[in-house]
Image (cartoon, rainbow, N blue to C red):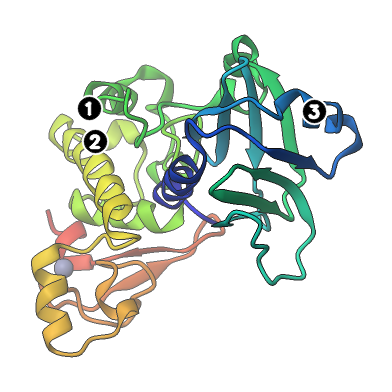
Amino acid sequence: MPEGPEIWNTADSLRDALKDQTITDFHFAFDELKKYETKLKGKTVKDVEARGKALLTFFDDEHVMYSHNQLYGKWMVRDNGQQPDTNRSLRVAIHNDNHSAYLYSASDVEMLSSEDVPKHSYIKKLGPDVLHPDTTYNDIIGQYQSDEFQNRKLTTLLLDQGFISGIGNYLRSEIMFYAKVQPQQKLKEYTDEEKEALAQATVKLSQRSYETGGITNDPEIVEALKRENAKYKEYRHFVYKRTDNRCHKCGSVIEQDSTGGRKIYYCPSCQLNQ
Ligand SMILES: [Zn+2]
C-alpha cells in the first residue's frame, strides 16, 4: 500500500505530464462518467494533488476528479499515444499533445465540483496531509497535543488517516524510531518533549522519503552502507522489516511486535531505554 510520499510522487509525475496542457482526448471506463469525456476535451489540468491516499485532478472548468487507488490501482504516464504493455483494465485516460496518463484497475473514481471536495466522504475525515504544501509543523504538533487523541494508542493512531494523513506502515515504525519513543503507549503517556520529537519525525521522515523515493534512513548512514555494498532493503530504513538485524545507530538487534495486526519494528536500546 503506497504511503503519502509515494502518492505525492505520483501526483508530481501526473502534474508534470498534464499541467497547463490542453486535453485532446479523455476516456472513462465507467458509464456514469462517460458524459464528462466531451466536457473535459479542450479543457486544461490546473493541478494534481494528493489527499491522504487519494488523488485530486483539478480542471480549469472547476471540475475535480477524485481517484483512490485502493490496493490495485496504478497510474502510468507515457509519451502521447503510447500505451503501456499491461493486462490491467483501463479506467481513465487523459491525453494531451505531449503525454498520455492512464489509470488502471482503480474502481474508486468520481467527478466532483470544486466546492464539493471538502465535503467528500473520504476527504472530510482526513487529518492534515503531512506533505501538502499548505500543512505546517504547527498543524502536525497540534494533532499530537489535541485532547481528541490522548486516549488512543500511538501505534493505531499513526495509521489513522483522520489523525495525520499520509502515514502508513513503514513511516509509522520509522517515525517512532527517529523520535526515540517506545511504541506501546497511549498518546497521553508521552511527555511534551516526546510529542515534539514525534511531530518533528513525522514531518522530517515524510519529506525525506518523498525526496529520496522511499528512503527514511539518515543520508550519512545510507552512504556508508552503500560503500559497503549494502542492498537497498538493508539501507532503506532504520528498523522497518529489519527484525533480527542490527540497529544502524547503536548495533542492538531490532525487534518486532505484532499486536494489533500489522507489525511494528523497533530498536530496544534506542527506544525503550530512554
Ligand atoms: Zn538502536
Quarter of image, res 81:
bottom right
Where does label 3 land, which residue?
38
Q: Nearer the viewer, mark 3 or mark 1?
A: 3
Quarter of image, res 145:
top left
Alpha-carbon span between mark 1 and mark 2: 7 Å
For disc 3, the neighbor class at 10 Å (few under 14, some 14 to 19, many from 20) is few
Q: Nearer the viewer, residue 273 or 15?
A: 15
Q: Amino acid at mark 3?
A: Thr
Would you say 125 lies left or right of 148 here?
A: right
Q: Could one spot residue 249 in this view of the protein? A: no
Disc sitting over residue 137 in the figure: 1
Alpha-carbon span between mark 3 and mark 2: 45 Å
For disc 1, the neighbor class at 10 Å (few under 14, some 14 to 19, many from 20) is few
Which is nearer the N-term, disc 3 or disc 2? 3
Where does label 2 land, which residue?
199
Q: Secondary structure at mark 3?
A: helix
Question: Does the CB distance between marks 1 and 2 fall below 8 Å?
Answer: yes
* Residue 267 position within the rendered picture, expressed as x and y whole percent measured from the top left: 23, 67
